[in-house]
Amino acid sequence: MTADTAVRASGLTKVFGSGGARVVALDGVDVTFERGRFAAVMGPSGSGKSTLMHCVAGLERPTDGTVHIGGTELTGLSEQKLTAVRRDRIGFVFQAFNLLPTLSAWENITLPLDLAGKKPDQTYSDAVVDALGLRDRLHHRPAQLSGGQQQRVACARALVTRPDVVFADEPTGALDSRSSAEVLTLLRRCVDEFGATVVMVTHDPRAAERADRVVTLADGRVVA
Amino acid sequence: MLRAMLRDLRAHKGRLAMMLAAIVLGVGFMVATWVVSDSTARTAGGGAARTDVAICAQALEPESGFTPAERDRLAALPGVTRTNGVRLGYAALVAADGKLAGVWPDRAGTGWDDSQRFVLADGRAPRAGELALGEQVAAAAGLTVGDTARVILADGSSVRPVVVGLFTYRPLGAEPIPSLAFAGDESAVLLGDRFDRVELATASAADETRLALQVKSIVDGEREVRTGAELTAERERMVADNARSVREVMLVFAAVALVAGMFVIANTFTMLVAQRTRQFALLRAVGASARQVRVAVLTEAAVIGVLGSTVGAVLGVLLGIGALAAFRPEGTTVAYTVSPFGIAAGYLAGVLVTVVSAYGSARRGAAVAPVAALRTDAALPRRALLSRAIVGGVLVVGGVAAVAATSGVDLDNTGRFVSMGGAIAVWLGLVVLAPFLAMAALRPLATLVGWRGGPTAKLAVRNALRDPRRTAATASALTVGLGLVCGFAVVGESFANVAGATTRDQVPAGTTVVQPALDGSRLGPEVVTKVRATPGVAAAVALTRAPVEWAAGDRPLGTTSMSPVDPAAFERVLTMPVVEGSGDLRRGAVVLRGNADLNRLDVGDTLTLTVAPGVTRRVPIVGLYRGWEGQPGIFLDEALVPAEHRGVLEAVYAAGSGARAGLDAAFADRPDILVTDRDGLVERLVKGFELVLAVIYAMFGAALVIAVFGVVNTLALSVLERTREIGVLRALGAGRTFVRRVVRRESIVITCYGGALGLLVGIGVGAVMQHVMLLQPLWPVGVPVPMVAIGVVGMVLVGVLAAVWPARRASRADILAAVATE
């Protein structure tokens, strides 16, 4: 694993069920994502792209193969250690409705730090907040924010821990085309302005166009 | 449509289980209550009615019994085929441990005969020097066939007969049930030769009518003649009355359990309907009418109600029988009775409560717009809180006004009613206002943890605040249960204060008190003589008490209690805590202040007292004394009352520096008599009341158990609703422990809020209750600190316990549920 590799998966296999109901979601996938790049994972539904992200992000344990994130091997980690890796090393941007409704925007942004019992780095978090134009929205609850603003809060939350990698799962799935474009620009800026590594799962070719690199999956294998 | 609903119900077994738990507990407790009260009454009522008595001549007062000569005269009447004289007398059984066996000795002794009175359960009938015991008493005393028992008689002497038999008793009419039977002839020596009643049997019914008239013409004085049929009817009525009064008391508790259950059921339904908004909307979108949706929800409620009631009824019967069996004194039999009424009432309550609670939800469920099916964030239309605020506000303000208007201690019955009604109105008002109170109490807390708290506290408090209505409804069951317990604790505390204060007012510190060892029993007249003769006793006063009919001029006041005392002895030994007028009993009567206020009497009024049948006295009120309602309504000079009508001898008070030592020695061998002092007296009063309170606490504890289920329900459903959120939290790096902690803290916030409100309401209602019951000022009241401490600790514990299962469920929530694209 070289210094500019953020995530590496090798021989990643995931099998659901057994016997007649056996489904091979990932079939020996080898993939690396470079640091500071915006990668898109594409593929038709059922191709295993979501499973790949879940396994790589430590949300699901692969049946076989290894995953390294920033030099740490995930396979074999205890549940607690996995949780800590997710908290400290990985950022997430989910589909819409992924903010905690009872917390203000600022509290949502700093939640991963809060969970780790850390204080936010004021200069860095200020920079993120200002860059995303959330300064005057910090004390609002998610319900008082527009869809685009909510997604920006989610991006800020993913960046605030300075993770090794930010995973975005269908980030444009629940948005109209204008908001989608906004979110993609946002992710692009995360990479360009903050040097983040972003891996985005999407089935939208227009979204994939904004990425530096596209990994295409079909039937659990990398085809391109 | 209906089928779809029912299938849906079956598919969500967890929800079903939660709702059923609430109903089962409520109904189960109610049915158990019924079983216990019926069985208790039936057991106490004794065996089947007797058939061997045609006519019974009985004395109305223990003193007016029949002499053997009188019995023989009745026996000689033509048509009498059998005569049976029944003696009842003082016999105190000493248990195996040397203490008095727990049975009132006053009329516990009788003579054995071969009538239907006795049914031998073990051994044989007693001969001279032997004794047969009632099964229950023998078990309580730890005695069995072959043991030698010690029995103290009316004159204080003891006999030591051998126990040869155990019996159950078949009582006649309303007679007290004797539990010590001596040999027939010997009973004349031990209990006195007078008969309490003479039972006559005849050969035919025709003889019976004629004979009844004849007996009536012979029997005079304070005696009455009844037929066997009348007495059987009287017995049945008494058993039924007993069962009813036991049941009424217990049903109050069952009702509280059911009210708590109602909150839980209603809240659960509300949440379930909220969760199924999209399903309803879908039904509406594909063409179901609002009415159809409403009917479906109600039908579902009815089905669940019937199901829950069935399980509840079965559980209740088992619970009732189990409780009876568990608390049954060893070696006795209980007449287990399961009445169809009880089960029917349980069903009715269970189904009704379920359907009524579901109705509100059904209406709201049906009001869901079809378009809601197309939204992912469908929410139920909310009713305006305005009407709630108005109703609650009016109740609270009105209630407070009513209590304030009647805050004086000179309350008559109307005043008591208004005051108590006011307290109840405030309580109801607070329940109605509960969502506002929840907001008012939790918002500042949320702000506080927002500044200073960690992420768990922040999330927990805000989650609790998310739906104040839900939090309030969940906490309400707790509030009701804890409020009642706390209210009675306040009354208990106040009672202890009042009893202590008034006893100290009336009994000087050095006074020695001689009382029956068993509360509610009476002392024999020989005790007074013995106390006076004891060395060290300088003076002694006997306190007797008798019911008396009283009137103020022409205004009849009903019945109160009087204590005729010797004024000179009274003054030497006790103090009259006079609040108005004087305490000079030579010039007239001294009346309990509360008793005077209740009947609007004052110093200077003249009372007309019917001190004995046909004997009335006109006595002026010379003073009012401070005391509580358990004390005599009137003190007066014993010279005004004929000796045999002075009532039951309750205690003898003795003054003199050597009195305690002398009396301790004099009654050392009398476990049926207690020698104590002022502090002992207070302690005894308080202990007796504490026992009653303990029972009340246990009963209302059931409401708390149900409330816990309510908290579990709310949390479990909240967790279900927030699966996605919990998944996000977990994905962002919250461990399972963190998630569990958030749920647990939310639970503690809810229970502590409910508990705090319950304690506050309880103290308030308790203050009014003691004001009304004991005629004490509303404030200050003694706050039962240990009770409050237990309440607070208990609420935290309840919160932790209730969260165990929902928290575990939450921590196991699938992270992917949050991340997965729909």
Image (cartoon, coloured by chain):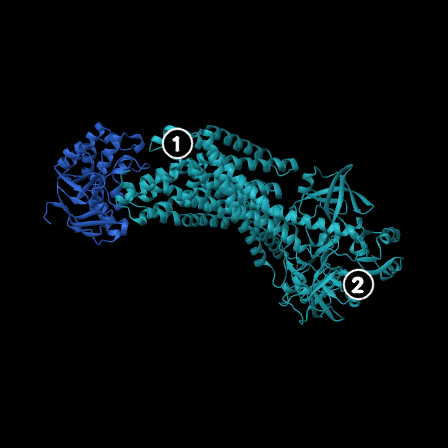
Chain colours: A blue, B cyan
Label 2 Cα crowd, 10 Å radius (few <14 / some 14-19 / many 20+): some
Q: Which residue is mark 2?
A: B192
To which quarter of the image does residue B472 belong?
top left
Disc 1 marks a residue whose amino acid type is Ala
Circle 2 — which element?
loop
Specify the quadrant of the image occupied by residue A113: top left
Q: CA distance from mark 1 to mark 2?
A: 85 Å
Q: Position of residue B801 (x, y in %)?
A: 42, 50
Q: Is residue A199 left or right of residue B210?
A: left
Nearest the viewer among B296 and B589 is B296
Indicate which disc, 1 or 2, sits on the residue closer to the N terminus. 2
Residue A64 image position (x, y, % from top left): 20, 52
| Quadrant showing the N terminus of chain B | top left
Q: Is residue A120 above or below residue B143?
A: above
10 Å neighbourhood of mark 1: few (<14), some, or many (≥20)?
A: many
Label 1 with label 2: CB-CB less than 8 Å:
no
Front in this rendered view, residue B164 or A60: A60
Tag 1's secondary structure? helix
The answer to whether A159 is drawn above or below residue B29 in the figure is above
What is the total number of numbered labels drawn onto the structure image? 2
Query: Which x, y percent locates residue B441?
Result: 42, 38
Q: What amino acid is labelled 2 in the image?
A: Gly
Asked if residue B517 lies left or right of residue A171, the reply is right
Q: Of the numbered discs in the image, which one, if any, rests on residue B281?
A: 1
Nearer to me, A91 or A207: A207
Report whether residue B486 is seen.
no
